[in-house]
Image: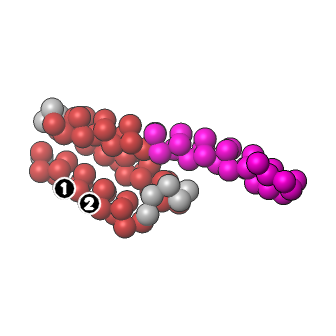
Amino acid sequence: MANHKSAEKRIRQNEKRKGINRANRSKLRTQIKKLRTSLTAQDKAASGEILAPTVSLIDKAVNKGIIHKNTAARHKSRLTKHVNALA
C-alpha cells in the first residue's frame, strides 16, 4: 500500500471523489433513462417536462468532469430531436 502520508491522503481523496462521481453519473443515467422511457411510451407531455431537467443534468455533468462536452452535446441533440419528433 501507500508508504507516504501524502499517498495515503491521496487514496482517501480518490475514494471520496469516486463516490461523488459515481452518484452524479448514476443520477445522470437515471434521468436519461426516464426521458427515453417516456419517449418510447410516446408520452408528449411527460417528455417535454423531463427534457429541461435532463439537459440541465447533462450540462452539470460536463462542468463536474463526468462526461466530455462533445458527448453531452450529442446526448442533448439526440434527445431534443426525439422529443420534437413527438410534437
Does the magenta run of residues contain 44? Answer: no
Residue at position x 37%, y 46% in the image: 54
Secondary-structure class at tag 2: helix
Instruction: For the residues labelled 2 and 1, say whether their Cβ atoms are less than 8 Å apart.
Output: yes
Q: Is residue 22 magenta?
A: yes
**Residue at disc 1, secondary structure:** helix
Magenta stretch: dominant secondary structure: helix
Q: Quadrant of residue 33?
A: top left
Q: What residue is pinned by disc 2?
A: 77
**Residue at (38%, 37%) from the top-left corner?**
30
- Between the residue at mark 2 and the residue at mark 1, the CA separation in whole angstroms equals 6 Å
The answer to which of 46 and 41 lies nearer the viewer is 41
Please rate how many residues cluster around mark 1, counting C-alpha atoms within 10 Å: few if below 14, some from 14 to 19, many from 20: few
Residue 27: x and y in percent read: 46, 39
Q: Is 26 on the left-hand or right-hand side of 36?
A: right
Instruction: Where is residue 52? Give x, y as percent.
Output: 35, 47
**Picture coordinates of residue 1, whole percent (x, y):** 76, 48
Residue 9 visible (yes or no): no
Q: Mark 1 is on which residue type?
A: Lys
Can residue 60 be seen by looking at this rendering? yes
Near-viewer residue (18 or 80): 18
Q: Which mark is residue 81?
A: 1
Q: Position of residue 60 (x, y in %)?
A: 49, 54
Image: magenta residue range: 1-26
- Disc tally is 2
The kind of residue tagged 2 is Ser
Residue closest to the eye, 45 or 18: 18
**Colour scheme in the image?**
secondary structure
Q: Name the mark on residue 20.
A: none
Q: Within 10 angstroms of label 2, few (less than 14), some, or many (20 or more) residues?
A: few
Residue at 37% x, 60% y is: 72
